[in-house]
Amino acid sequence: MNYEANKIAFAKPELTVEDLTIALHQANLKLTESNKKLVESEKKRSELLANISHDLRSPITTLQGYVEYLLTYDHLEEQEVFLTLNQMHGKLHTLDYLLNEMLMVTSLDSFNDSISLQPVQIESCLSEFFNSCKEDKKYAQRRLSFRVPEYFPYLAMLNQKMFLRVLDNLFTNALKYSSPNDEIILKADIYEREVIIAVTDTGIGIEQKYLPLIFDRTFMISDSRTPEQSMGCGLGLSIAASIMEKHHGQIWCESTLGKGSTFYLSSLLCEY
């Protein structure tokens, strides 16, 4: 390589002060945006930990009270002991539920962008889940309806275990925010290349202003329904949203206060 070729090869690009200023400004904007996202993520994490700590503290405090009660009184009747132990069992169940929810959040965050999906017969999956709910005593005071077409030969790409967890969460919420003799409906339909599954209840509903927030991990929805009813640390619906995102699908809600809510799930159909 001759001298002129070397000179051209190693020549510095001709950048004006204006070009450098623009480049520096763009770099600062990107850095500011990244920092903003980092601060927002840390804030959400802190809020989530605060909510979880609050939800864990309540059953733990109650359990401590029950233990002190059993240790303090020497002459308790057998029935009193039984009732106290039964209450303790319920609080332990609450703690187990909260810990499982937190473990699910951690495992979902640690997953890669994709999860293992395989073709699942939709009607069979939904009918098995619905029948298990009908046999569950906790739904005894609700009217359960299955409105999936009799001929529904479609397959969807699902992780069945995770998808059933989403359905279970939606049915549990429908039970929690409805009254005896209210109806819980499971429906399915096809729209273009997607299956749309809906869980509808005729319960108390959700205020419109809260609908964009209900899938946020740090959102506490108790004030949008009744003071006595709380969604805990708000992990159930956020877990459902994370699962549907990893299915390349969506979850959304339509609701009318005092009339009930419908949660929709969309998932891609298998290519034939």
Image (spheres, rainbow, N blue to C red):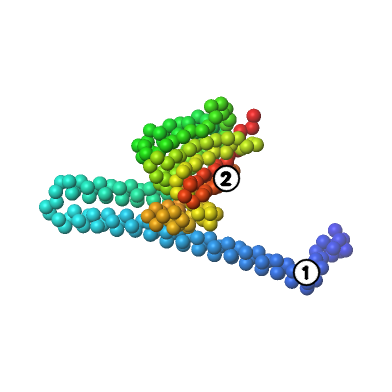
Rendering coords of residue 101 (x, y %): 42, 49
Q: In front: mark 2 or mark 1?
A: 2
> What quarter of the picture does the N terminus occupy?
bottom right
Rendering coords of residue 141 (x, y %): 37, 39
Q: Nearer the viewer, residue 224 or 117?
A: 224
| Residue at the left extreme of this rendering | 75
- The residue under label 1 is 19
- Tell me the number on the disc at residue 191: none
Q: Nearer the viewer, residue 100 or 13?
A: 100
Q: Residue at left 42%, top 47%?
A: 177
Label 1: which secondary element: helix
Query: What is the count of numbered marks?
Result: 2
Q: Amino acid at mark 2?
A: Gln
The answer to whether 70 appears left or right of 54 in the picture is: left
Q: Residue at left 53%, top 40%?
A: 198
Q: Is residue 118 something one can see in this rendering?
A: no
First-in-chain label (2 vs 1): 1
> In the figure, residue 57 lies in which quadrant?
bottom left
Rendering coords of residue 107 (x, y %): 47, 48
Question: Up-down: is 204 above or below 38?
Answer: above
- Tell me the number on the disc at residue 250: 2
The answer to whether 135 appears left or right of 34 in the picture is: left
The answer to whether 96 appears left or right of 171 in the picture is: left
Q: Amino acid at mark 1?
A: Asp
| Residue at the top extreme of this rendering | 151
Label 2: how many residues lie within 10 Å, few (<14), some (14-19) or many (20+)? some
